[in-house]
Amino acid sequence: MSALTLGLICGLAFGVVDVLVMLPIKFEDKRKKWEAFASAFIDRFILGFLVPIVNLGIHPALSGVILGLGLSLPSAIITRVYVPIVGIGVLGGLIIGFIANFVL
C-alpha cells in the first residue's frame, strides 16, 4: 500500500472518529454544531493524512506525536479547550504512526 493511500484511509477514519466523539456535545445552534463538526473533521483528516506521508527521519510514531501536537495546538488555543483537543491529536498521531510503521 502506498503512503498516499494509507494517508487517505487514516485521514478519513480519524476524521470520522473525532466527529463521533463530538456527537454528545451540546451546541448553541445547529449551524455552530455543523461548523464544529466540519472543522474537527478537516483538522483530523489532515493529521491522519500527513502522518504516513511525512518522513522526519525518526520513528513514525514519534513523527505522529509531533504532528499531532503541532496541528492540534492552534485549534486548542482558539477554543481554549486544551486537554481533549491536544490529547486526541497526540494519541491519534501516535496510533497512526504505529500503523504507518507496520504497513509501509
Image (tube, rainbow, N blue to C red):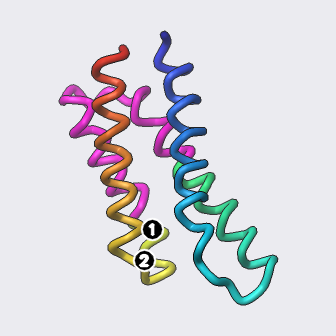
Q: Which mark is residue 43?
A: none
Main SS, magenta region, reads helix
The residue under label 2 is 77
Give percent across and percent down for residue 40: 58, 60
In front of the other: 51 or 102: 102
Q: Quadrant of residue 99?
A: top left
Residue at the image position 29 percent from the left and 18 percent from the top: 102
Position of residue 41 in the picture relative to residue 4 (left or right): right
Give percent across and percent down for residue 49: 51, 35
The residue under label 1 is 74
Against 46, residue 36 (above or below) is below
Disc 1 is placed on an element classified as helix
The residue carrying pointer 2 sits among few (fewer than 14), some (14 to 19) or many (20 or more) residues within 10 Å by Cα, namely few
| Stretch in magenta | 45-72
Tell me if residue 57 is in the magenta stretch: yes
Against 84, residue 79 (above or below) is below
Q: Are marks 2 and 1 in contact (CB under 8 Å)?
A: yes
Position of residue 89 in the picture relative to residue 41 (left or right): left
Residue at the far top in the pictured view: 1
Give percent across and percent down for residue 41: 61, 54
Disc 2 is placed on an element classified as helix
